[in-house]
Image: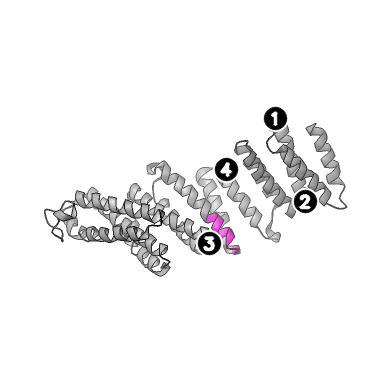
Amino acid sequence: MHLAKWPGAASSETSFDDVALLLTMLFKICRLCMHANGLDVAVDAITKAAHCVALLPDMKARLTPEQLEECRGLEVQNLCLRTALAWKEDRLEVAEAMYAKTELLRDGLAPEAAERLAEVLYEMGRGLAEKTQHGLAARWLGRTLDVLGKQDVEMMSRDALNLKDAAYQTMVTSLLETGVEADRATAAAMVQQMAEEMGEKPIVLALRLEIFDKAADGQFDGKAYADAILGLDRLISCTETNAGLVQQHILSLHQRNPIMGCKTMDQWLLKQAQAGRLEGVEAGVRERINMATQQKGVTQTIFDLMKLLDGLL
C-alpha cells in the first residue's frame, strides 16, 4: 500500500516516515520468519525491504539529525538481516561480506538500533554454538559484545543488558569447548571483565567454575575451585536443581583433587544441615560415602566422613 504511493526513486513527495514504517514492518517479518525457519518468506520480505532502502540515499539531504540517525539504524538492520539470512542458508562467506558493510555505520548507533543489531548477531552465534561450531560461534558472539560494549550502560534497556549477559555466557562456553588453551585464557579474561562490570554474581561464579573445570592438570587450582563452588552456593537460591549443580562441581573437583573434594563436600553438607536446607543432602551424603570408599589406602577421609556424619545427626 505504501509502495504504491512512491514513484520509484525518492522524490519530494516520498515520506521518510512512511519508508521507515514499512522497513520496520518488513524487518520484523524477516526476523520472525527466520526464527520459524520460513526462509522463503524471510527472503521475500528482505527483498521488498531492498526497494525501500534504495530510496534512503536520495532522502538524506532533507532529513533532520534525528531522522538521519534513524536512517542509519535502518541501513544497519538491513545489512545485518541479510547477514543472518546468508548464515541461515549456510553461505558464511556472504555473511562475512555483508557484515563487513556495516562497519562504517556501527559507530554511534542509537541504543534501539544497536540492540536490534546485537540481537541478530547473538542469534547467529548461539545457532553456531548449538551446531558445535564453537570457533565461529565465538567470533559472532564477540561481535555482539562489541556492539553492546559501545553503548552507554545507563541508556541500555533491561533486554539489552540481559542479552549482553547471555552473549558473555554463550561465548565463554564456546571458547572453552574449542579445547584451545589460548581460548581458555580469553574466556578467563572475559569472566574477570564480567566480575569487574557486574560484581560476583551467580553467572560470573558459574562461568568461573567452568573455567576451573576445563583447566589442564598443570594449571588446575583446587583451592580456588573449591572457593568458587562455595561462593556460588552462597549466592544461589536453595533448590534441588541448584544443589545438584553444586554437587556436580564438587565431584569434578574430587576427580582432580580427592582430598580437597572431600573437604568441600563436608563443608557444603554441614552448611546445608545447619541452615535446615535439606535439598540434596541425602544425595550428597551418598556421594560423600562413595568418595571415601574410592580413596584406597587413605584413612583420613574415612575419619572425616565419620566426623561429618556425627555432625549431621
Question: Which mark, residue 134?
Answer: 3
Q: Is residue 209 above or below residue 129?
A: above
Asked if the residue at tag 4 contacts the one at tag 2, i.e. Cβ–Cβ closer than 8 Å, the answer is: no
Quarter of the image holding residue 45?
bottom left
Q: Are marks 4 and 3 in contact (CB under 8 Å)?
A: no
Mark 2 near mark 1, Cβ–Cβ under 8 Å? no
Q: Mark 4 points at which residue?
A: 202
What colour scheme has been applied to the protein in the rendered image?
Answer: one colour
Q: What residue type is labelled 2?
A: Pro
| Mark toward the start of the polypeptide (1 vs 4) | 4
Label 3 to label 2, Cα distance in Å?
31 Å
Q: Which of marks 2 and 4 is nearer the N terminus?
A: 4
Q: Residue 258 carries which label?
A: 2
Direction left: furthest residue: 12
The quadrant of the rendering that contains the C terminus is: top right
Give me the residue at 86% from left, 50% from top. 298
Amino acid marked by disc 3:
His
Q: Residues within 10 Å of mark 4 (few under 14, many from 20)?
A: some
Residue at (75%, 48%) from the top-left corner?
260
Range shown magenta: 171-181
Look at mark 1 in the image and give the residue it sits on: 276
**Residue, x 56% and y 46% (percent of image)?**
204
Q: Which of marks 2 and 1 is in front?
A: 1
Q: Which of marks 4 and 3 is in front?
A: 3
Q: Horizontal placement of 242 versus 284: left or right?
A: left
Q: Compared to 88, does 117 lie above or below?
A: above
